[in-house]
Amino acid sequence: MIKITFPDGSVKEFPKGITGLEIAESISSRLAQDALSITVNGQIWDLTRPIETDAAVKINTWDDEEGKHAFWHTSAHLMAEALQELYPGIKFGIGPAIENGFYYDVDPGEAVIRESDLPAIEAKMAELAAQGEKLKRTDISKADALKKFQTKGDEYKVELINDLQDGTITLYSQGNFTDLCRGPHLPNTEKIKAIKLLSVAGAYWRGDEKRKQLTRIYGITFPKKKMLDEYLLLLEEAKKRDHRKIGKELELFMFSDMVGKGLPIWLPRGTDLRLRLENVLKTIQQRFEYQQVITPHIGNKQLYVTSGHHAKYGKDSFQPIHTPEEGEEYLLKPMNCRHHCEIYKFKPRSYKDLPLRFAEFGTVYRYEQSGELHGLTRVRSFTQDDAHIFCRPDQVKDEFLKVMDIIFIIFNALDFKNFEAQISLRDPNNKEKYIGTDENWEKAEKAIIEACEEKGLKAKIVQGEAAFYGPKLDFMVKDAIGRKWQLGTIQVDYNLPERFELEYTGEDNQKHRPVMIHRAPFGSMERFIAVLIEHTAGKFPLWLTPDQVAVLPISEKFNDYAFDIAKKLKEKSIRVTVDERNEKIGRKIRDNELKRIPYMLIVGEKEMETSCVSVRRQGEGDAGSMSVEEFAELIHNEVASQMKQFN
RNA sequence: GCCUUUUUAGCUCAGCUGGUAGAGCGAUUCAUUCGUAAUGAAUAGGUCUGGGGUUCGAGUCCCCAAAAAGGCUCCA
């Protein structure tokens, strides 16, 4: 007998070699039906795999990530089986479960798999699933595995096996399909009731651009048809929040083929919103003793040669601009730091001057691959809410903490709760990729980790993700359809000061090297606003939104009164429009609701006689009537309480 | 840049197997002067993204280009 410990701490004895499925059955037939995988001593196992020793277990259902994972992993195998039937000779790369569903990378040889082929593959999968084939786990030696896949001609699998450590290798089979796989899997395929293949994409083998591009098919499956319908509905809903769609509807920004791809153009309403966001940060930065600066959009190429950026990015960048007479080379600035270093060097600095904090909403230009451009989140020209802090080495941590304060103020005030923080460190096995001494790197990495600990920020530490000049702390937020984007960033840089020989005079009357911190709370105004649009679905907070109030006269007879009201509100710095169209009130309400105007004032005979306005809050409906003065105060109070969060 | 897909009126989209362009919304004009999410009518709007080809004939088929979408790669 073996002792099985359950998540609630209870312990039961079972015969040696019992399986997860049998354990589940012993608890309830319902659980046995819902069970998808089992966690045994922290490892996820098949339900059918015998447990031979005492173990702590957790039975995973659809409600557990581990359960879904097994479900989708098996779905990937099911798809592979279907593909093998439909495309004889197809070769397989990898086919994992992902956050939402699964994919399989395949090499169909001469054949091309198109989106229009997906329904046929889905149908084949459904047919195979209905047969309820059992998944069989086999252990074989590396040599046998190699032989098996070599015979089959599956060169990708052979490569994968070659990279595996010697020892037992596991295979999973169902029907005629056998795959190299660690598992775990569902006991059989019949639980897969609803299947949707979502898209076809090219994916480089092992993520390497230089290697062959395989065909990746993304799909998702569910145990119930209804769950698939709900998921597809959710996707539809998410698409409605897409910043590209809302940006167009609300006339915030545009793109023009003539101006160029990836070059966003800010329309008046978008500019209005963006400037308000910039101003709020400027005010905060004033409080934190930043100094605003302005620098040109281009700079001598030599700046970037010295900084080392040109060597690294030069050939993939916008190419230099040449002066017609002298043949000098200038680059569109890809970042602001170099210019800010020059400001630092403008005059000798004393330890008493530090820290110096130069801030600029600096527009930078970077050549991004055309396939990567995406709305406002990935563009070729964008404005960083950039600042560079020059400080003494002993001030780094303190400055880092202060920057974190600014980021938290912004994120809290704008209700960005679901951000992830990531500390990016150097890849310890690949140090030549980076500029700078070991000692400096270690100092910088330590400062970041300590600062996060001090702030109680749970940050994920990732090796090898650092910029080439220093480690960084990034804040990532997800967009409407779950893609992660980096917003705020804080990066320590010991290298630029070195390369540009920045100095300050210390207490000891000696020259010392300052440390530089790059930081941008929003990251890029474009990307931040894109994410903000998706988070709010275009319903911006009152302080920020381009139009706060729309006055809606019941009929044209009351247009004059409406303009009168608008004038009074404008005098009180409230952003107001009048809907003077010859339309019925229901229509005006509908249109202004869709424009996400926070407040509507309905004015007709009743209001004119009593000198008041009928207030309607967006999305909420009639909120009673009041005088213009009372309404203005309501607006001011609401804005004031929102602005208070920035203090 | 690569793979797959898309591009028709200001916007959202129809247009089957090639026979010469359509709707809704919006805009304009007129009527109506209206009480909390769409008043009615009329009118104007298109070298069907651009270029080449096949064909008696191309929005529709083929090739090239541009832009966009979903991925891959990249991201100072």
Image (cartoon, coloured by chain):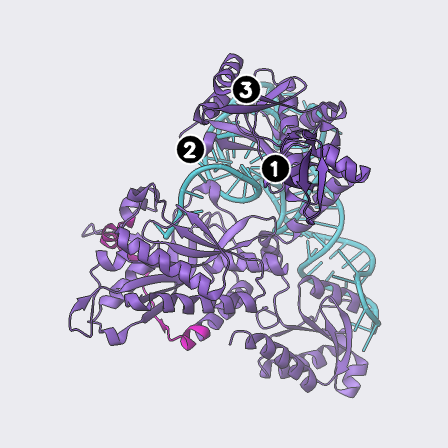
Q: Which quadrant is home to the N terminus of chain A? A: top right
Which of the labelled discs sits on residue A44, or is there none? 1
Q: Nearer the viewer, mark 3 or mark 2?
A: 3
Q: Residue at x 60, y 20 (%)?
A: A178
Left or right, residue A58 beside residue A266:
right
In this rendering, does residue A412 appear at all?
Answer: yes
Same subunit: marks 1 and 2: yes
x and y, in percent, of residue A245 in the image: 61, 52
Q: CA distance from mark 3 to mark 2?
A: 33 Å
Q: Position of residue A40 (x, y in %)?
A: 62, 38
Going by the numbered disc 2, the residue's amino acid type is: Glu
Check the rendered structure and report the hue given to chain B: cyan
In this picture, residue A538 sits left or right of residue A346? right
Q: Are marks 3 and 2 on the same chain?
A: yes
> Which residue corresponds to mark 3?
A140
Residue A391 visible in the snapshot: no
